[in-house]
Image (spheres, helix red, strand yellow):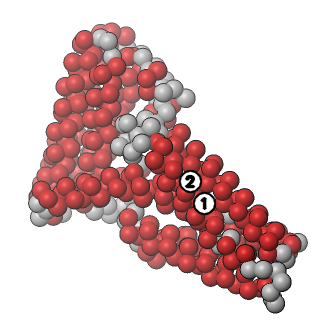
Amino acid sequence: MKTFAELTEREVLTLAITGEEEDSRIYQTFADSVRDAYPHSAALFDGMAEEERSHRGMLYDLYRKKFGEHLPPIRREDVKGFLKRRPIWLTKNLSVEKMRQEAEIMEMQAYRFYDKAAAQTLDVSVRELLHTLAEAERGHERRAGELADANLGGDAKAEEEKTRRRMFVLQYVQPGLAGLMDGSVSTLAPLFAAAFATQNNWETFLVGLAASIGAGISMGFAEALSDDGSLTGRGTPWMRGLICGLMTTVGGIGHTMPYLVPDSMPNAFMVATSIAAVIVLIELWAIAWIRARFMDTPFLQAAFQVVLGGVLVFLTGILIGSA
C-alpha cells in the first residue's frame, strides 16, 4: 500500500479522475431521490453532479495530453489514509439533512486532497488545475450548506455548530466507539471461558487484564496506522490511536474488575460472575446509546445488534470454558 507522498503525478490525476466520477454519481443519486419532495435541493445536487462531471473532463483532458489514454489500475484503497466514500447513498429513504452532511464531508475531503496534491506536484499545469479544483470543492462545501437554509431553516451559527459536531464525531466518537465495542465484546469470550474453566477469580482477572490491555495496544496501533487524517479530516493518527486504545482497554477492564473479589469469600466465583454479567449489560447498553446519539442509528436497532453480538460471544466463552 502506497502513502500519498509516494504517488506520481500520473497516479494523482488518475485518483482525481475516478474520484470525480464517483462523486458525480453520488450527487446524482441524491438529486434523484429527493426530486419530488425537495425540488430545490434536487436542483442543487444536479448542479453539483454536473460540476463533478465537468471536473472529471478537465482532469482527463490534462491527463491525455501528458500520459495518453490509459489510466493505471490504482484505486483509493491502494493508498494509505486516502479518503474513502461510505456507501451511505445506498441507504433507502435517506433524509435531506443526512445527504447535506455527507456532501459537506465529501467536499471537505476533496478540497484537502486537491490542496495537498497541488503542494507536492512539480508540474505547473497540473498544479494550477489542482488549485482551481480545490477552490471549486471549497465552493461546493459552501453550496452543500445552502440546503440547510433551503429546507431546514438553519442559520450560520447553527451550521457551524453542526460542522463542529460532525468533526467531533469523526475525530473522537468514531475511534472511541470502535475501541469500546471491540474491548467490550471481544474480551467476553476469553474472560468467561477462563472463568468457567478455572472457577478461580484471580486467574480469571489476570486473563481479562491481559486480554484488555493486549486488545487496547492492538486496536490503538491499528487505528493510528490506518489513516494519517490529512485528507479525511479524522484528526491526528496518534490521538485517534490513543482514544481507540484507551477505550478498548476500558471496555475490557469493566467486566474484568469484578474478579478481584477474593477467592476466600463465600461463593466468590458466583458473586464476581454475577457482577460481571450486570456490567456487560451496562456496557452493551452504553454502546447502543452512543451509536444512537452520535451515529444516527435507531436505538432499538443499535441495541438489538450490539446485544445480539455480545450475547453470542458471552455464550461462546461460557460453552468453551465449561467443556
Residue 50 visible to the viewer = no
Residue 100 visible to the viewer = yes
Query: Which residue is found at the position 17% from the left and 61% from the top?
Result: 158
Residue 72 drawn above or below residue 78: above
Q: Which mark is residue 245?
A: 2
Query: Are the residues flagged by discs 1 and 2 in contact, CB closer than 8 Å?
Result: yes
Quadrant the N terminus occupies: top right
Q: Which residue occupies the foreground of this view, 154 or 283?
A: 283
**Type of amino acid at the residue the image marks with label 1:** Thr
Query: Which residue is found at the position 30% from the left and 47% from the top?
Result: 105
Q: Quarter-wise, where is residue 188 in the image?
A: bottom right
Number of marks: 2
**Type of amino acid at the residue the image marks with label 2:** Gly
Q: Is residue 97 left or right of residue 7?
A: left
Q: Which residue occupies the foreground of this view, 193 or 140?
A: 193
For mark 1, give the secondary structure: helix
Q: Quarter-wise, where is residue 51 in the image?
A: top left
Q: Is residue 84 left or right of residue 32?
A: right
Q: Badge 1 is on which residue?
A: 249
Q: Is residue 16 left or right of residue 144?
A: right
Query: Which residue is found at the position 44% from the left and 56% from the top?
Result: 174
> What is the spatial separation of the Cα atoms under label 1 and label 2, in whole angstroms?
6 Å
For mark 2, give the secondary structure: helix
